[in-house]
Image (spheres, helix red, strand yellow):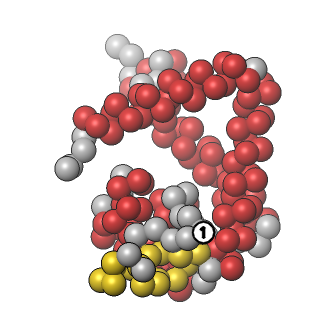
Amino acid sequence: MVTRAERNATDPDLGVLSGRLLFAVQRELFTTLASQGFDDLKHRHGAVLAYLDPGGVRATELSRLSGQYKQIIGTLIDELEALGYVERRPDPSDRRAKLICPTARGLAQMSAADAIMAAIQRRHADRLGQETYERFKRTLTDITEHQRSQTADD
């Protein structure tokens, strides 16, 4: 009988593969960010930072985009605010709502993270060939969106 560990070593399922990819990308991203002076960030902060826009984003939208519960996003926003990466500002389109906006430090981190992610993607595109890499990303996006639609809480 094949053990789960053996099966995952030779024929990993979608969850194992996507987890391995996520953890490897996060490790490279956050290690490189730390070497550039952003050593106070944790991998979990990516659920907010990956979707943050210079003009701000509502917490509910960050929750929807990341697929994380609103309470988790709220905790992450609190942590990032305490670290000086984001601030809450009134939403000009709805006085009751708040926008989560990057500070100067947050904008610097966003720029650094974008450059790191572009380098990671370029490395894979160079290795596979641009056309193959683009096809891979389209397929992975399709699988991801289809899976998310199967488990939506809406």
Single out the residue that lies furthest toward the top. Answer: 1
Q: Residue at x 74, y 52 (%)?
A: 116
Residues packed near mark 1 inside 10 Å, few (<14), some (14 to 19) or many (20 plus): few
What is the number of callouts on the image?
Answer: 1
Q: Does the rendering let one see residue 8? A: no
Q: Position of residue 81 (x, y in %)?
A: 52, 82
Residue 102 visible to an observer of this rendering:
yes
- Give the image quarter of residue 143: top left
Q: Nearer the viewer, residue 27 or 136?
A: 136
Q: Nearer the viewer, residue 151 or 52?
A: 52
Determine whether 15 is above or below 113 in the image: above
The amino acid type of the residue labelled 1 equals Pro
Q: Is residue 124 placed above or below 25 in the rendered structure?
A: above
Identified at 21% across, 49% down, the residue is: 153
Does residue 60 appear left or right of residue 54 in this picture? left
Residue 114 position in % (x across, y down): 70, 54
Q: Quadrant of the N terminus?
A: top left
Asked if residue 115 is positioned above or below residue 107 in the image, the reply reads above
Measured from the top left, where is residue 94 in percent x and y?
33, 78
The residue located at (40%, 70%) in the rendering is 58
* In the depicted structure, whether residue 73 falls above or below residue 96: above
Rendered image quadrant of residue 112: bottom right
Report helix, strand or loop for mark 1.
loop
Q: Position of residue 32 (x, y in %)?
A: 75, 58
Q: Which residue is mark 1?
A: 54
Relative placement, left or right, of 135 versus 59 is: right
The answer to whether 90 appears left or right of 60 in the picture is right
Query: What is the residue that sits farthest to the front in this orientation?
Result: 93
Image point 46% across, 84% down: which residue? 89
Question: Is 109 placed left or right of 4 in the picture?
Answer: right
